[in-house]
Image (tube, rainbow, N blue to C red):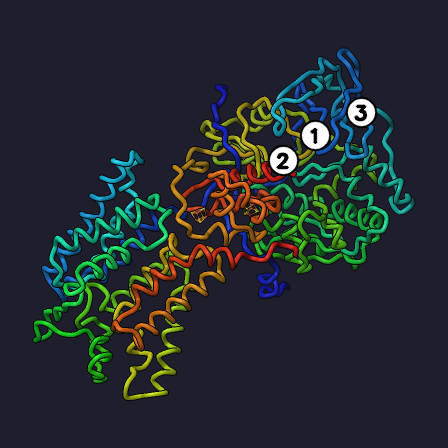
Amino acid sequence: MNDPKPYLSPGPHIFGNQETPRMVRDVIIALMPAVAVSIYFFRIRAFLLIVISMAACVGAEAAIQFLMKRKIRITDGSAVVTGILFAMIIPPALPLWMAALGSFVAIGIAKELFGGLGSNIFNPALLGRAFLMAAFPTFMTAWNAPITLDAVTGATPLGLVKFSHNLDISYLNLFLGNVSGCIGETSAAALLLGAGYLFLRKTIDWRIPLSYLGTVAIISFITEKASPGTYAGPAFHLLAGGVIIGAFFMATDPVTSPVTKAGRWIFGIGCGLITMVIRLWGGLPEGVMYSILLMNGLTPILNRITRPKRYGT
Amino acid sequence: MYNYTAMLSNTFRGGVCLAEEKELTVGKKTKEIPAPKELIVPLCQHIGSPNESIVKEGDAVRVGQVLGDAKAFVSAPVHSPISGTVKSVQNFFHPVFGKSPAVLIENDEKHEPLSTSVKNDPARLSKEEIITIVRNAGIVGMGGAAFPTHVKLKVPEGKIIDTLIINGAECEPYLTGDHRLMIEKTKEVIDGVNIVSRVLGAKKVIIAVESNKLSAVFAMKKVIKPPLKIEVLKTKYPQGGEKQLIKAILKKEVPPGKLPLDVGVLVQNVGTCFAIQNAVCDGKPLTERCVTFTGSCLKEPGNYIVKVGTRLRDVIDYCGGFLTPPAKIISGGPMMGVSQYTLDVPVVKGTTGVLFLSEKEAAICEEMPCIKCAKCVDSCPLRLLPTDIMRMVKYSKWEYLKELHPSDCVECGACSYVCPSKIPLTQYIKLGKIKELNKR
Ligand code: SF4
Ligand code: SF4
């Protein structure tokens, strides 16, 4: 008998089937319904913006990793996710070069400068969007209506409710995404389908979406009861704007959210609170982006103050 | 019948559900492997003070003769499993210590016993006599830890053991030796449990078995009498860890740096109880044990009664060799076992199983950056933050390490198992532990 030549390694010797590239792939798959719906509603504009953002993100990642002499890791798919997510949260009329610039900021500054995959503090796609918001505010708030509506331009439902107190809402259109808004945030139906897939695959934790959406629902319920003519109710605030994509696809980004369970609850509640404060009393119609970015910034502190009680004490 | 909802609540927080891989061996009757021509009996097969050799080259030894012993209290003697001649006393391979002193014995195939066999009635022996028999028989924890059993049985002044937990959880995948023992040697195991319970004066005796071993539960149900009780626990790793067993059954947490006896509990493995019964009732020292030889590379996976000192090579030869050459050989379970590089290592008292895994079963994946997914945090039964500890160790932030309590880690490997980025977290945490210890 020839002796085998086994290899040595410390335990454990077997591993679970969850793998980071697989989890990233899951997010890409989960975004597909939203991508499809956005192309249906915004046609070639959506398609071009998505492709450009993805290409810019992957290109930026490869270039920066090369320049910083890091291992080129574009095959892990995380840059693709950032690209798609970024495209989902920009207006359909945005010039293509701005989308490319925003993508570059997302990957180059928000991700790679902080140390690359796993080391960033802020969600890259959201930071890219925040940059465009600061640099080109008019472009970031010019809304094209979807192809299915007669209008060419239109205010978003959140804008209508906030600035014109127009509470005449079609919930069906809100749910399907047949309204003005960012490319991929409008269709709650498509996003929920993707979120369901992520839960099935155990890729995301339920605590952040639940506490985020729960907080939004409770606050809007109370404010609507308090002054029915001014404020819209929970159904509107959950379906309109970016709450769904934010709660399921951005706030749940593991890298930028707490690792403790208590931390995740606080994170979700914080996102919900800030979103609603901005929506109801702030100067902007929408607050999802800032709320998540703010809570991203608080994550290291949340991790520290919510450490589990030491075993046996 | 069993109340299954109660069963599912019988567990601890954290942990992981593993692929069990037990079906390879669980249905097979245990077979005895005859002693080979030569045995390599390591002098040190326990945790504690090392043994000195009592025999030298050329000595004739008999079955059960002491080969090595130490004066220290925390030690356990080693006996010869066979009769024959000592060929040499020198360093040989050891599954845990790398290389360590061992006695090479040539088998004369005569099986000459040291003395005429003794039969004891344990009820007539005093507690002290039983503890002495256990020590002299060289019994150590058979669940893999190999801590001398008599030390555990001698409860320090002022401490009271209120509950004795018998560990039949066998939560490591692949291993089925304890399961077979509970089915095939039910009476002996229970007799052993009763001996231990008498020595400790425990009020409650609970035999803990995971829900995937109901056949063992039914077998034992038939022979146990109060105060013995069986608790069926949820099948989850590391259910068989002492702290997790105590948490699952008594909802008590053992404080950091303390022992189960500080919360009035003692945990003994079923295999240890069997060895105690053998020693006390039949005067047999611990020289053989049930070992699960398994993995997809083996022709005949199964449970085998193997003499301590038998090299893996001899067992493999006896049970038909390999189907395919193994990519990894592990002494112990796949989670906490130690990987081996030669078939010349012997089976020792603490060997629960030996796994021969294929490339596919033991795949090593590329390590990726931590994505802070918290799967490791959710899996840690000790509520540690493996990802944070790993980061502090990796970037040498020793000053922050202490507040993360790496010393609480039981090295179960659950965090490494679940990590999607395949980071060897357990390794980092062990390093952190060593750093913290050295600082004190
Ligand atoms: S399981 Fe791995 S990737 Fe996830 S937080 Fe822990 S160390 Fe990081
Ligand atoms: S940190 Fe230690 S105790 Fe916790 S899961 Fe990892 S190995 Fe097990």
Chain letter for mark 3: B
Q: Residues within 10 Å of mark 2 (few under 14, many from 20)?
A: few
Question: How far is the residue under mark 1 from the one under mark 3?
Answer: 13 Å
Q: Is residue A281 visible?
A: yes
Q: Nearer the viewer, mark 1 or mark 3?
A: 1
Asked whether the residues under marks 2 and 1 belong to the same chain, the reply is: yes
Q: Circle 3 is placed at which residue position?
A: B66
Residue ID at (42%, 63%): A267
- Image quarter where the C terminus of chain B lies is top right
Dot 1: element: loop
Residue B11, percent from left and from top: 60, 58
Q: Nearer the viewer, mark 2 or mark 3?
A: 2
Q: Circle 2 is placed at which residue position?
A: B438
**Residue type for callout 2:** Asn
Question: How far is the residue under mark 2 from the one under mark 1?
Answer: 26 Å
**Residue type for callout 3:** Val
- Determine contact: label 2, label 3, CB under 8 Å: no
Residue ID at (29%, 48%): A78
Q: Earlier in the sequence, mark 2 or mark 1?
A: 1
Q: Is residue B240 left or right of residue A255?
A: right
Task: Tell which of B29 and A285 is nearer to you.
Answer: A285
Above or below for B135 versus B213? above
Above or below for B133 versus A211? above
**Residue type for callout 1:** Gln
Q: Earlier in the sequence, mark 1 or mark 3?
A: 1
Q: Is residue B94 left or right of residue A106?
A: right
Q: Circle 1 is placed at which residue position?
A: B45
Q: Is residue A200 visible?
A: no
Q: Earlier in the sequence, mark 2 or mark 3?
A: 3
Task: Tell which of B388 and A287 is nearer to you.
Answer: A287
Residue B101, percent from left and from top: 69, 20
